[in-house]
Structures are given as structure tokens and as C-alpha cells.
Amino acid sequence: MDAQPIWCGSAISPSRWSTQGGTFHEAEAAERSIAQILAKADAARDLHSAWINTNCNPKKGRARKSDSELAAEARYLNRLGQQLNVRCRLESANDSIAKW
């Protein structure tokens, strides 16, 4: 299938991928980032996107993140990955049922 245009930040890009930044080192912001990325993933799936690239946003003033902030970032990224994985498994199961 040909690549479909999907929203990538500030421009429309004819691509089979989507990119999304997010703040993951602060709990409240991480919850918002996860919700936004999952919503974008659902929209991207409908456009047959092949993958999503997620980058962690830096701290204000590009300050160094503490060990606890990096640990939080890892926890929230893992949680995002688990939720995306569940969506992929559900989609694969639905595809299998539809083909059967």
C-alpha cells in the first residue's frame, strides 16, 4: 500500500511513520503524553502507519535529569510500550478473525 499522509508535528508528511515528543520525567505530564501518543497511534493505525517514533522532551533550559527523573522516564516509556503492544495484539487478533 502507498504511504498515506499523516500529521507529524508541524507539517503533513507523506510517510508510513509518525513522530511524537513527550514529557516522561514528570508524572502528570507523562500521563498526558501517553494519552496523546495513544490517540495519535490510533489515528496513525487508521492511516496504515508502520511505526511511531517517540522522543523524550528535555527539561526546561536543557537541565540535566536526575536519576529519579530518568527512572520515572523509563517507567512511563515502558508503560507506553506495553499499551501500544496491547493495541497491536488486539489489531492482529481482529485481523486474524476477519481473515478466518
Image (spheres, rainbow, N blue to C red):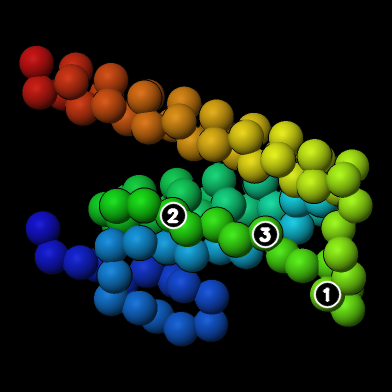
* Number of the label disc, if any, that sits on residue 56: 3
**CA separation in Å, label 3 and label 2:** 13 Å
Residue receiving disc 1: 62
Query: What's the amino acid at mark 3?
Result: Cys
Residue receiving disc 2: 52
Task: Judge from the rendering whether residue 94 lies leftward or rightward of residue 8; answer left or right.
Answer: left
Is residue 52 at all visible to an observer of this figure?
Answer: yes
* 67 to 19, vertically: above or below: above
Task: Judge from the rendering whether residue 92 lies leftward or rightward of residue 59; answer left or right.
Answer: left
Question: Does label 3 or label 1 sit earlier along the sequence?
Answer: 3
Asked if disc 3 and disc 1 are in contact, CB closer than 8 Å, the reply is no
Residue 76 at what x, y percent from top left? 71, 39
Asked if disc 2 and disc 1 are in contact, CB closer than 8 Å, the reply is no
Image quadrant occupied by the C terminus: top left
Query: For the point 35% across and 62% down, which residue is it?
Result: 17
Q: Quadrant of residue 91?
A: top left
* Number of the label disc, if any, that sits on residue 12: none
Residue 42 at what x, y percent from top left? 45, 47
Is residue 30 at all visible to an observer of this figure?
Answer: no
* 94 to 62, vertically: above or below: above
Query: For the point 37% across and 69% down, which residue is it?
Result: 6
Describe the element under mark 3 as helix, strand or loop.
strand
Q: Residue furthest bottom?
A: 11
In-front residue for pair 50/69: 69
In-front residue for pair 66/4: 66
Query: What's the amino acid at mark 1?
Result: Arg
Question: Does label 2 or label 1 sit earlier along the sequence?
Answer: 2
**CA separation in Å, label 3 and label 1:** 12 Å
